[in-house]
């Protein structure tokens, strides 16, 4: 493969960029691709180049995302969806939620909503590779690999990024897409509101005795939720939530012990677990940046917010951030406004910060209701879940909001 998109640090420092995107994961790469398609001159900083070669026999990755219709539209409009289709992905058509402590359950069906599916489960590495493929074809997007940041200066007429190697990069706008522990956010002295859920998520893919029926199965347990997310070839992605002090215990289980624990946690819903792949675990923390923007700086994705991953909304919110920022920057350019101007970037913050906060709190409310720490909650669930299951219009509206997003969608999400 031609590597003309990769440049060295001296070449990068010799140019003035419209936008420097720090972080080439799913959200950062989507933002870079969208801006490149809008003829912005973009430099993407990333630690290492993702593997774009595809082997259909490759083991399933541990990290998986459940993509909404809005994310599907964004990736299709960016020209990245075909890269997902040519690799591995799976549409799921139903969700089934039930409670360990009561006989209550809720079932969501795409057919009831007149939708072809409720979303797609895709490995994160596949999403990233599918975005990078068209991104590196654009001559106005260049990639700088492996460089470390040391300092950020936003005080002048442009942003200046100082690298540990001694070079200085200049742009009208720097975008932090460098994840939950964002170095750019820290260098910009942007504070963070945090809340430790005191839970961890154990994730990885497994094969089961019975078919998942293209359904995502979620069981609320005393220790936390357990979910099977349906994937291709009757594989399911596990999302197993536990108290944080059990994280190392879960990682240290032998494969046979792990299989037994999964079968118990799922109440044997899909029968025996017949194959297991790599598993990883991470603590769950809500983070929300106190500000999304400063002059010449914007935060997107996990650099701006992390969320309880129960409903799989994390990367979907990040894609909406990226698409909204693209709309804002294109509109500013059309009005001959500097794209790094604070008043321009504030429009992006007003658009996205409240929506992200609403989704964060909604997920927490759901988590609170299903925590089995009070008899009153059990009584509420026993009443509420059957009612919700029978109120089809309300149930379908809730699922439509999750699938399609709320109003004021960015252009790429339509």
Image: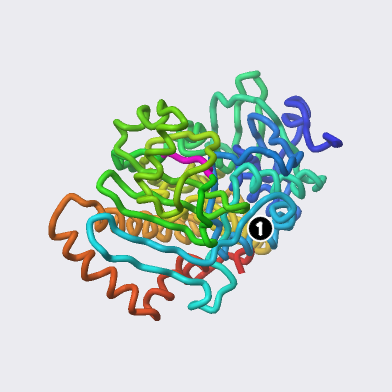
Q: Nearer the viewer, residue 324 or 229?
A: 229
Q: Which residues are magenta?
A: 202-206
Residue furthest to the top in view is 165
Q: Nearer the viewer, residue 3 or 292?
A: 3
Estimate the x, y position of residue 238 in percent, counting from the top left: 47, 45
Asked if residue 284 is positioned above or below residue 257 in the image, the reply reads below
The reply to whether residue 286 is in sight is no
Residue at figure coordinates x 54%, y 46% from the top left: 207
Q: Identify the element where label 1 is drawn.
A: helix
Judge whether residue 145 is colored magenta. Answer: no
Q: Nearer the viewer, residue 334 or 182?
A: 182
Quadrant of residue 28 within the rendered picture: top right
Residue at figure coordinates x 23%, y 64% from the top left: 381
Q: Is 134 situated left or right of 279 in this image?
A: right
Report the magenta stretch's main SS. strand
The reply to whether residue 227 is in sight is yes
Q: Quadrant of the C terminus?
A: bottom right
Q: Is 356 situated left or right of 116 in this image?
A: left
- Look at mark 1 in the image and give the residue it sits on: 75
Q: Residues within 10 Å of mark 1 (few under 14, many from 20)?
A: many
Estimate the x, y position of residue 116 in percent, counting from the top left: 59, 72
Q: Is 371 situated left or right of 404 in this image?
A: left
Estimate the x, y position of residue 134 in percent, counting from the top left: 77, 50
Asked if residue 283 is positioned above or below residue 339 in the image, the reply reads above
Estimate the x, y position of residue 360 in percent, counting from the top left: 37, 54
């Amino acid at each position: 493969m031609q590597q003309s998109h990769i440049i060295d640090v001296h070449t990068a420092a010799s140019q003035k960029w419209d936008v420097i995107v720090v972080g080439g994961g799913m959200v950062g790469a989507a933002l870079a691709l969208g801006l490149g398609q809008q003829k912005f001159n973009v430099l993407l900083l990333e630690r290492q180049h993702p593997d774009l070669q595809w082997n259909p026999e490759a083991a399933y990755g541990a990290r998986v995302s459940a993509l909404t219709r809005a994310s599907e539209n964004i990736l299709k409009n960016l020209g990245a969806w075909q890269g997902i289709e040519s690799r591995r992905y799976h549409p799921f058509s139903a969700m089934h939620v039930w409670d360990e402590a009561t006989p209550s359950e809720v079932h969501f069906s795409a057919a009831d909503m007149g939708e072809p599916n409720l979303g797609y489960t895709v490995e994160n590495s596949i999403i990233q590779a599918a975005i990078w493929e068209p991104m590196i074809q654009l001559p106005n997007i260049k990639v700088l690999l492996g460089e470390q940041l040391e300092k950020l200066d936003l005080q002048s007429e442009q942003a200046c990024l100082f690298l540990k190697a001694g070079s200085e990069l200049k742009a009208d706008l720097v975008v932090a897409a460098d994840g939950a522990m964002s170095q750019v956010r820290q260098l910009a002295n942007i504070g963070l509101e945090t809340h430790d859920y005191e839970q961890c998520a154990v994730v990885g893919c497994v094969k089961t005795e019975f078919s998942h029926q293209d359904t995502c199965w979620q069981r609320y347990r005393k220790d936390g939720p357990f979910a099977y997310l349906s994937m291709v070839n009757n594989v399911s992605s596990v999302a197993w939530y536990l108290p944080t002090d059990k994280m190392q215990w879960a990682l240290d289980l032998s494969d046979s012990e792990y299989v037994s624990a999964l079968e118990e946690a799922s109440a044997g819903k899909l029968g025996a677990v017949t194959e297991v792949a790599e598993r990883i675990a991470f603590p769950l923390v809500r983070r929300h940046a106190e500000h999304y923007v400063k002059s010449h700086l914007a935060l997107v994705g996990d650099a701006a917010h992390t969320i309880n991953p129960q409903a799989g909304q994390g990367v979907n919110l990040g894609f909406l951030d990226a698409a909204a920022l693209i709309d804002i920057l294109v509109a500013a350019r059309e009005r001959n406004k500097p794209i790094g101007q604070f008043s321009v970037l504030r429009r992006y913050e007003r658009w996205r910060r409240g929506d992200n906060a609403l989704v964060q709190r909604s997920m927490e409310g759901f988590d609170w209701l299903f925590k089995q720490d009070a008899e009153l909650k059990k009584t509420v669930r026993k009443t509420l879940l059957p009612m919700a299951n029978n109120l089809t219009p309300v149930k379908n509206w809730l699922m439509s909001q999750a699938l399609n997003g709320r109003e004021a969608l960015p252009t790429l999400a339509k």
